[in-house]
Structure formats: structure tokens, C-alpha cells
Amino acid sequence: MSVAEDLSFPAVREQVSAAEWEQRVNLAATYRLVAHYGWDDLIYTHISARVPGEDNHFLINPYGLTFDEITASSLVKIDLDGEIVMDTPFKVNPAGFTIHSAVHSTGKDAHCVIHTHSNDGVAVSAQADGLLPLSQTAMIVLGDLAYHDYEGIALDLDERERLIADLGEKHSMILRNHGLLTTGATCADAFLRLFFLERACTMQVRALSGGRELTMPDQGVPEKTAGQAKFGTANGIGDLAWPALLRTLDRQDASYRD
């Protein structure tokens, strides 16, 4: 049986700490959820998470597996340079970690980084005005949203400094002509930010395609809404929804836990 046919490696759990195993399960769940909502891009794009207690070690998807195949055991442990640091039958895409390594290296609470090439996310990233305050969802997102101009496929390491500078203290970013990026102290936080950003982009694409005059909120309302959202989600924005999301995955296919 090929590795692609058997993605369960019980020995991995025996080799890692309980904290790392929990992070592996949550990260595998994040991959499955991105696939569930249709934001994946075959084997491309990545979600990475810092290994608890190991500042310079990270978990990332094995290159060649689709997001709905990812399991806790199949995730690959790498260092900040994208080099594999734990035995695995899989390979990784070092170039795919360029953006992620930049964000992880900031030393902030960016312990999980999600990057997508979704249809609506890329569509909005190509629009000159970026994300517009057309919906409550967008207004919630806007207060924590940054932008980074496209510089080509993310292969040049010197782009990392500019990306970090553009992200600043924000947790969400539109990579112009490219896609979306969110960060979080946990996989749950990063995913919830992605959920709202992706939905805001979808709402904008649909609103702009409706062929009718749009209603824009009064001056100051987007800022007020962003402030209200920040007050209400100051800590652990994903804590409440995450268990329910895991239950959804468990009802469908609990193999991400393997």
C-alpha cells in the first residue's frame, strides 16, 4: 500500500508531546475545514502552526496531499527555513513556507497562519478598492485588515521584510492579485478570521455582480462596527465555535485525528 493510501502513522503520536499532538489534530482539522468550505486549491497553498514549546519548529502539510487527506500524523515538522526536522515519508514545498515563515518570525501571536487562493478572495484581491464596507461581516473584518502588493510567486526571501511591515499589528491580510492570509494565537482563531474574511469577499463579489446601485454605510459606521467587534472578540475569538466545527468534521470523517 502506498503512503498516499495509508495516511495513518500511529508511531508519530508516540514520538511527540501531548501539546504537539493536540496542535497536530487542530491543524489537520483546519485543513479539513478549509476543504469543507471550498477554499482549498488542490495541493497548493498552506496552513502552518507553531509547535508548542518549540519556537522555531512548525507543522505544515505534506506536499502532494489534498487538504481533505491531511491527518494529524501526516503533518510534517519543519524549521523556520522550511527544512524537515522529524522523519517522515513526505516532502514539503519550501517555497510555500516563504510567506508563512515571515509571519511566524515576527514573534507575535501568529502561531497559526492560513493562506488561501479562493475564487472570491482572489477576486477581491484584484479589485483596486479592496474590501468594501458593504456588509456587517466586512465591517467587522476591516478594522484588522492589511494589504500587501503582489511581487510575483513568493520565492524571494527579501519579500518577507516588506510583508511583515505591511501586516504590522493586523491579523488578516489581502495579498493583492494573489489571495488571503489570516493569523491567530490558535488554529481556531486563525480559522475564524479566515471564515469572516472569506464570507466578506463572497458577499462583495455577489453584491457587485447584482447590477443594482449599492448602499454604503454612513460615515463612521464601519469604524464603529470594527470597534464593537474588537471589544466582543478580544480573547480567543475561535474558542466558542471551534468545538462545534470539530463536531461537524467528526460527523463527516474523523480520520483527521489519526
Image (cartoon, rainbow, N blue to C red):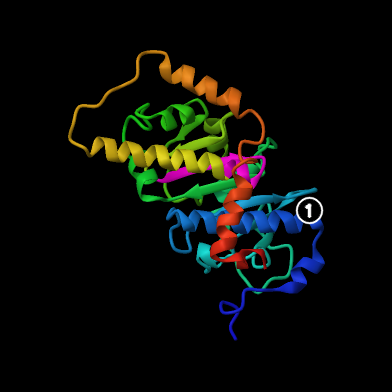
Residue in the picture at 42% in, 47% down? 152
Residue to which mark 1 is pinned: 19
What secondary structure is found at the residue carrying circle 1? helix
Which amino acid is tagged 1? Ala
Residue projecting furthest to the left: 211
Percent position (x, y) of residue 119?
Answer: 35, 50
Taking depth in this image into account, of 218 and 243 the one nearest to the observer is: 243
Which one is in front, 119 or 97? Answer: 119
Residue 181 is covered by the magenta coloring? yes
Judge by depth and name the residue closer to the eye, 190 or 129: 190
210 with respect to 84 (left or right): left
Q: Quadrant of the C terminus?
A: bottom right
Q: Nearer the viewer, residue 68 or 4?
A: 68
- Say if residue 95 shows up in the picture: no
- Side (left or right) of 134 relative to 103: left
Q: Residue at x 57, y 25 (%)?
A: 230
Q: Where residue 220 appears, x then y in whole percent?
A: 42, 13
The residue segment tinted magenta is: 178-190
Q: Position of residue 122 (x, y in %)?
A: 37, 45
Position of 172 with respect to 83 (left or right) is left
Can the viewer see residue 79? yes
Residue 12 versus residue 180 in the image, above or below: below
Q: Residue at x 53, y 37 (%)?
A: 163
Identify which residue is drawn at 31% across, 21% down: 216
179 drawn magenta: yes
List the single residue furthest toward the top: 219
Q: Position of residue 172 (x, y in %)?
A: 52, 36
Classify mark 1: residues with Cα within 10 Å, few (<14), some (14-19) or many (20+). Answer: few
Query: Can you say whether 13 is above or below 188 in the image?
Result: below
Indicate the quadrant containing the N terminus: top left, top right, bottom left or bottom right: bottom right
